[in-house]
Image (cartoon, grey):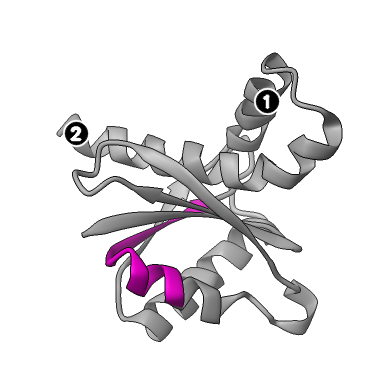
């Protein structure tokens, strides 16, 4: 059973998946969504869950730097409930502060062009979210 990591945005969801042992996270894809129209790519997420035998979802939880929950954090909380109801697997909220910035820095250091960075940044952020969660589980 694998764990899926998600980075929820307003226009895309970055998707990462763990290896079977739950040690490493790999970027899988970026799904286009439309938050205003409540279109969250649930059909595609369902395919990924089935194809990869996902048993848990780790969803980025964007808190403010002072630890409070703002509108994007509330959106993640609501989406976690939708995921649990739709797929009947647990959705864990994982503090994602600075993950997008970290992903951007890695891509800049790798000299990835701006247009290519835009296409993969959400997927990379999902990798950082999932890897942080996986690393926390191996320390216990």
Q: Residue at x 25, y 37 (%)?
A: 23
Q: Secondary structure at mark 2?
A: helix
In the image, 97 versus 45, the foreground residue is 45
Q: Earlier in the sequence, mark 1 or mark 2?
A: 1
Please give the name of the residue rendered at 53% of the width and 75% of the height, measured from the top-left corner: 44
Q: CA distance from mark 1 to mark 2?
A: 27 Å
From what the image shows, is residue 63 above or below residue 15? above
Q: Any magenta on residue 74?
A: no
Q: Residues within 10 Å of mark 2 (few under 14, many from 20)?
A: few
Highlighted magenta segment, given as a residue range:
47-60
Image quarter in which the N terminus is found: bottom left
Residue at 43% across / 68% down in the picture?
Answer: 48
Vertical arrangement, residue 71 with respect to residue 38, above or below: above
Q: Which mark identifies residue 130? A: none
| Residue 106 occupies quadrant | top right
Q: Confirm whether the magenta stretch covers residue 55.
A: yes
Q: Report the residue that reaches farthest toward the top.
A: 109
Would you identify the image quadrant in which residue 116 lies? top right
Q: Residue lying at the far front in this picture: please name it.
A: 51
Instruction: Name which residue lies at 61% across and 32% down.
Output: 98
Q: Position of residue 50 (x, y in %)?
A: 34, 74
Furthest residue toward left: 140
Q: Splitting the image into 4 quarters, where does residue 25 fall?
A: top left
- List x then y, in percent, for residue 36: 79, 77
Residue under pointer 1:
107
Q: Which residue is mark 2?
A: 138
In percent of width and height, residue 55 lies at 26, 65
Viewer-side residue, 110 vs 60: 110
């Amino acid at each position: 059973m694998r764990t899926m990591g998600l980075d929820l945005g307003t226009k895309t969801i970055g998707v990462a998946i763990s290896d079977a042992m739950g040690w490493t996270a790999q970027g899988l894809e970026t799904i286009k969504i439309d938050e205003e129209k409540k279109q969250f790519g649930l059909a595609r997420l369902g395919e990924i869950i089935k194809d990869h035998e996902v048993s848990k979802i780790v969803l980025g939880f964007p808190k403010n730097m002072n630890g409070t929950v703002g509108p994007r954090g509330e959106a993640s909380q609501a989406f976690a409930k939708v995921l649990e109801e739709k797929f009947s697997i647990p959705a864990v909220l994982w503090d994602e502060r600075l993950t997008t910035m970290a992903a951007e820095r890695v891509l800049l250091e790798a000299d990835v062009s701006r247009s290519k960075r835009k296409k993969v940044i959400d997927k990379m952020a999902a990798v950082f979210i999932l890897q942080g969660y996986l690393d926390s589980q191996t320390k216990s």
